[in-house]
Image (cartoon, grey):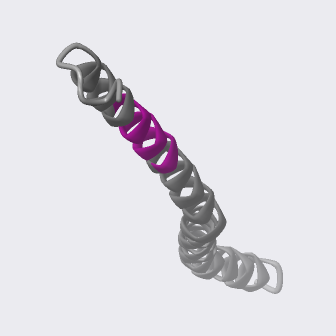
């Protein structure tokens, strides 16, 4: 009966729209939180792994460039000692 009156219909419509918007925003927030958790689980370890491999490769390249220098120093010192 009161739904048929002109004053209460917009109030009920606004209430239903507000409730649906509230639920949709809550669901969207929950969905965004779940996607953030999934990104933290999947993306950050892969980024960490990429950083780890990059740092290892950079340190290995530095050590590989330093090793010949050390061998040259050793060979030069070994050549000097017998002579």
**Residue nearest the viewer, comparing 64 with 35:** 35
Verify whether residue 23 appears in magenta.
Answer: yes
Secondary structure mostly seen in magenta is helix
Quarter placement of the N terminus = top left
In the depicted structure, whether residue 7 falls above or below residue 75: above
**Residue nearest the viewer, comparing 4 with 72:** 4
Residue 75 placed where, x, y %?
Answer: 69, 85
The residues colored magenta run 18-27
Q: Residue at x 22, y 13 (%)?
A: 7
Verify whether residue 79 appears in magenta.
Answer: no
Residue 69 placed where, x, y %?
Answer: 59, 74
In the depicted structure, whether residue 68 falls above or below residue 3: below
Residue 67 placed where, x, y %?
Answer: 65, 79
Q: Residue furthest right?
A: 82
Q: Residue furthest front?
A: 1
Q: Can I make out residue 66 in this image?
A: no
In the depicted structure, whether residue 71 falls above or below residue 25: below
Q: Quadrant of residue 70?
A: bottom right
**Residue nearest the viewer, comparing 54 with 3:** 3
Q: Residue at x 52, y 59 (%)?
A: 35
């Amino acid at each position: 009966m009161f739904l048929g009156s002109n004053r209460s219909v917009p109030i009920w419509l606004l209430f239903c729209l507000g409730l649906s918007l509230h639920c949709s925003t809550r669901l969207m927030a929950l969905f965004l939180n779940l996607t953030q958790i999934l990104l933290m689980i999947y993306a950050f370890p892969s980024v960490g792994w990429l950083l780890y491999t990059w740092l290892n490769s950079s340190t290995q390249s530095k050590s590989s460039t330093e090793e010949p220098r050390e061998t040259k120093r050793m060979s030069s010192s070994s050549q000097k000692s017998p002579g």
